[in-house]
Amino acid sequence: MKLSSDKLRNVALAAHGGAGKTSLAEALIFNAGATSRLGRVEEGNTVMDYSEEEQRRTASLSSAFFQYEWKKHIISLIDTPGDKNFFSDTKTCMPAADGAVIVIDACTGSDIRTEQSAQFAGENSIPAIAFINKLDHERANFRQAIDSAATTLNPKPILIQLPIGEKEAFTGVVDLIANKAYSLKDGKAEPMDIPADMADDVETERAELIENIAEADDELLERYLEGDDILDAELVAALKNGVKRRQFMPVLCGAATANMGIGLLADFIVEAIPSPLERIPFPTEDGEDVAFDPDAPFAGYVFKTIVDPYAGRLSLIKIVAGSLGKDGTVYNTDKGSKERFSQLLYLAGKEQKPIDHAEAGAIVAVAKLKETFTGATLCDESRKVTFKPTAPIAPVISFAVEAAKQGDEDKVFSSLSRLQEEDPSLGLDRVAETKEILLNGMGMVHVEATIEKLKRKFNLEVVIKPPKVPYRETVRKKVRVQGKHKKQTGGHGQYGDCWIVLEPQESGAGFEFVDAIVGGVIPRTYIPAVEKGIVEASSKGVLAGFPCVDFKVTLDYGSFHAVDSSEMAFKMAGSLAFRKACEESGGVLLEPVMNVAVIVPDDFTGDVMGDLNSRRGRVLGMDSEGKYQVINAHVPMAEILTYAPDLNSMTGGRGTFTRVFSHYDEVPGDIAKKVLEKIAAEQEN
């Protein structure tokens, strides 16, 4: 299989979960003769959903790849996940595609992830076509599906096919450009007469299609308005140009599991999706974007990593410029180092097949690169470039992770780090104050699937539990106290004496130490020791052992002993002074507050805002995104630890949210009392 640029069509299949992307991919591959049977998701025998976790859940958890030949072109499919738990992979893999097929479920229409799929295509400036799937299902409603697409998707969807029948009566389609009907059966499209009862609809829709296409071409529009006949060949050329320039989104239809309309879609992919050479230049960090040119020095973007505990790391590369042979050396601009590879591969589901050569636009894989991870740029050292990486969607749920078996503690973080290499949407943190390893994911299912993968790939079992909230402490009022450490033993004793003024500072100001000693009452050599004692004591606080923040200490008096004073004695004196000052000042418990953006349909805004208020949230305002509302709020972290499943339940799975740390705020007195009592009980146990 020669991957030459002009004959390539790199296509991402994207949509919400359950729309039938994998079934569509299976039908496209089967019709091309690349597989001997039509795989079915519910039977767990598809070539695209091949991992144990995917087969068990009957859903795509990660993007899968397959290259097949159709009409002397190489079609490289990217079957992306639609479940919101794994949807970040759709976003990060989209730059590798040169066009997208947005799959719309004829039973449910467009939803938030359908809209986001089209948005991801737009962010990468790649054209999109839509395919209304499942027209043979008993709840199919073509008009409802196209209406929902028209109100939510960008660019403007335009019909180029009409279904003949619906539900069990779905038998074919009408091609509005050619003005021909096709009977669909057994994966084939046979010409037939346009049904008489559809003649008026076809005439109306075809006229609207011609008008939509003409609007994208000034010359064609002028002729259309003057009443001139427009040839089919002119329509096709203008349509392809409009798709390439993202002026509209052509809509086709069919039924993937019944293999109806798939061949016509495959033809349209070849005809309407541009080759990589027609794509706009690939964005770089410095703004000097790189054109897709097979004759230029090599440059490639690593958009995905697959980790195998035995085979090592597999790096998937979108070749932007130049070409790659079956082995060679490339330069990693992220690390400033050279990487050697000994085999060039393309993916066909779980299989890896060697190739000798690939040009600009191709999607290839190389194994065992030592320092190359997702988002990296590989290039020829003669022309160093750095491509702009695509940021994953931020995690929304966190769990503390512990080894299930004693002795496996050291393996937990390193093994999760390996999984994070292939799934950048996973977050992994060590929290010093709570001594926990936090696994952050897109939802409960995402975390559960990661734990399953950890067991399968690394034979490591872990348990998860809600994380502890990383509270902070601060002081309430200004006080002046003495800290005196005096201890007499045999030989030299210990003596350190200091007076400090402790006072609160504004939020975020941190710690400030002021040396106001005059007259040498404390020797200069001991003053840093006092500060060190205060810093160490503040790291453990006095209320519940959390770090104390945002305070100022002024050291203004003290005394020393010529023989018994030492740095250690003054360090102890500083620590004692700080603890005593905190007790007199009246400590305050602070909690992390998150900036939360909840995206929901209009119908759910009231319920969601009420729920946020019940979680001690403060709604900051609302913005509109199509038919969805974005509710912005500040919510204490302690109140949204389980928000992902709660929001899913509240909105029937139609709501999503993001969260980022905003600031620390004082915990209300009654809640602070309960928190402190709970922590004290845990420490006793």
Image (cartoon, helix red, strand yellow):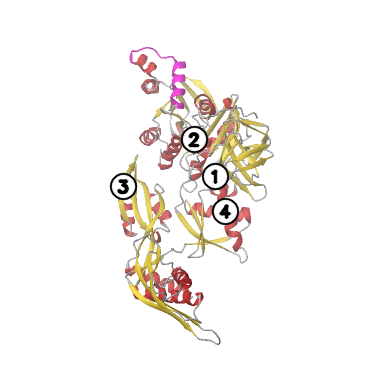
Residue stretch in magenta: 225-244
Mark 4 or mark 1: name the one nearer the start of the chain: 1
Q: Which residue is mark 4?
A: 417
Locate residue 284, reporting x and y percent.
50, 37
Majority SS type along the magenta span = helix
Residue lying at the far front in this picture: please name it. 519
Q: Marks 2 and 4, how far apart in space? A: 28 Å
Q: Image quadrant of residue 203?
A: top left
Kindly indicate whether the residue at mark 3 contacts the one at mark 4 (C-beta within 8 angstroms).
Answer: no
Check residue 291 for magenta coloring: no
Asked if residue 63 lies left or right of residue 238, the reply is right
Mark 3 surroundings: few (<14), some (14-19) or many (≥20) residues within 10 A = some
Could you give the CA–CA distance between mark 4 and mark 3, rounded to whole angstroms? 37 Å
Residue at 46% across, 83% down: 486
Q: Judge by depth and name the residue closer to the eye, 28 or 672.
A: 672
Identify the amino acid type marked 2: Pro
Residue type pointed to by label 4: Ser
Tag of residue 89 = none
Q: Residue at x 64, y 28 (%)?
A: 2
Secondary structure under the numbered disc 3 in the rendered image: strand
Above-or-below relation of 449 to 48: below
Mark nearer the N terminus (1 vs 2): 1
Q: Which residue is mark 2?
A: 283
Q: Which element carries disc 2, helix, strand or loop?
A: loop
The residue tagged 1 is 62
- Residue 245 position (above or below residue 639): above
